Image: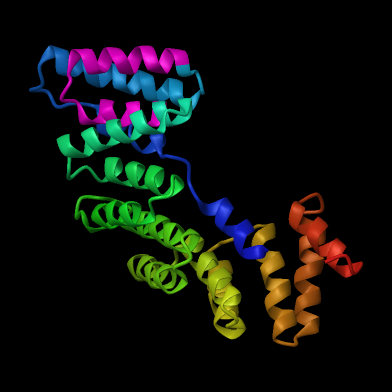
């Protein structure tokens, strides 16, 4: 289904990329704390490179240097998640939250982990805590993630509300607009879906998912010419995409 394809594209990986700046300690920190922060940075960088053995070495060292370093525990949560040790990952994330309960990046990463591992209620709770933090620079991203978590759990009304909250924070938030278009179409509301998709394009959005969604929305509304325009764009701009293959299969009567 189109809704599944769009959702998968928008669900972020645990966002180690959000953390590097946050790992730097202030000038009054002790030398062990500074060393711990530095090794946490290195560990996260190795995680980005998928060098798990080096990441573990640096993160373990960071925790030895400062066991109260919440960011190091959160990095360990990411590490053990990658290693498949979900119980240890959960324990490390929970420790990170206990040490830095107002750190929105930690909350957001723990929430991603929980939603991916069958605990949507807990995950949404932490996403919303992150979104409410007045110092968090991208609350709309936490709301978008919470919406995905709700949708994956089958709570479509909850997902719709959270997406609308994300757009209220940032009206030109293209990812949330596309999700709203996709969700409204999945709910059988083709006209609102068209409106959100048009806002998505106006916000600079682009991609094969949105064009295939446009084909389907316009067909549902009986606008064959507009559907054909979207189909032509999809074939011309993304000829090798999975969405183009799906469209061609449907045109041949195979879907």
| Residue shown at 63% from the left, 57% from the top | 5
Q: Is residue 132 above or below residue 44?
A: below
Q: Quadrant of residue 37?
A: top left
Q: Which residue is at the front of the view, 106 or 158? A: 158
Q: Is residue 144 left or right of residue 243?
A: left
How far across and how far down the image is residue 73, in percent? 27, 28
| Residue shown at 39% from the left, 70% from the top | 158
Helix, strand or loop: magenta stretch = helix
Q: In which quarter of the image is residue 34?
A: top left
How far across and how far down the image is residue 188, in percent? 60, 81
Image quarter hosting the C terminus: bottom right
Per the rendered image, the range of residues in magenta is 53-79
| Residue shown at 67% from the left, 69% from the top | 213
Q: Is residue 183 left or right of residue 57?
A: right
Q: In this view, does 193 lie to the left or right of 1?
A: left
Q: Is residue 201 above or below residue 219?
A: above
Q: In which quarter of the image is residue 171?
A: bottom left
């Amino acid at each position: 289904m189109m809704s599944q394809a769009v959702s998968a594209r928008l669900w972020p990986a645990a966002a180690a990329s959000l953390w590097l700046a946050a790992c730097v300690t202030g000038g009054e920190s002790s030398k062990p704390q500074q060393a711990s922060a530095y090794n946490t940075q290195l560990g996260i960088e190795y995680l980005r490179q998928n060098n798990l053995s080096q990441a573990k070495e640096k993160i373990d060292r960071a925790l030895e240097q400062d066991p109260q370093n919440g960011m190091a525990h959160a990095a360990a949560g990411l590490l053990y998640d990658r290693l498949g040790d979900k119980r240890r990952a959960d324990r490390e994330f929970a420790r990170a939250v206990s040490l830095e309960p107002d750190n929105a990046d930690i909350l957001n990463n723990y929430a991603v982990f929980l939603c991916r591992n069958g605990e949507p209620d807990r995950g949404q709770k932490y996403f919303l805590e992150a979104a409410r933090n007045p110092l968090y620079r991208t609350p709309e991203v936490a709301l978008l993630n919470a919406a995905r978590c709700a949708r994956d759990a089958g709570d479509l009304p909850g997902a719709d509300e959270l997406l609308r909250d994300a757009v209220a924070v940032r009206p030109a938030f293209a990812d949330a607009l596309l999700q709203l278009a996709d969700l409204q179409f999945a709910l059988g509301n083709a006209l609102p879906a068209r409106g959100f998709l048009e806002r998505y394009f106006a916000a600079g959005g682009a991609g094969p998912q949105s064009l295939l969604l446009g084909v389907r929305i316009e067909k549902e509304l009986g606008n064959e010419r507009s559907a054909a325009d979207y189909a032509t764009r999809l074939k011309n701009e993304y000829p090798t995409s999975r969405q183009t293959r799906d469209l061609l299969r449907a045109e041949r009567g195979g879907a």
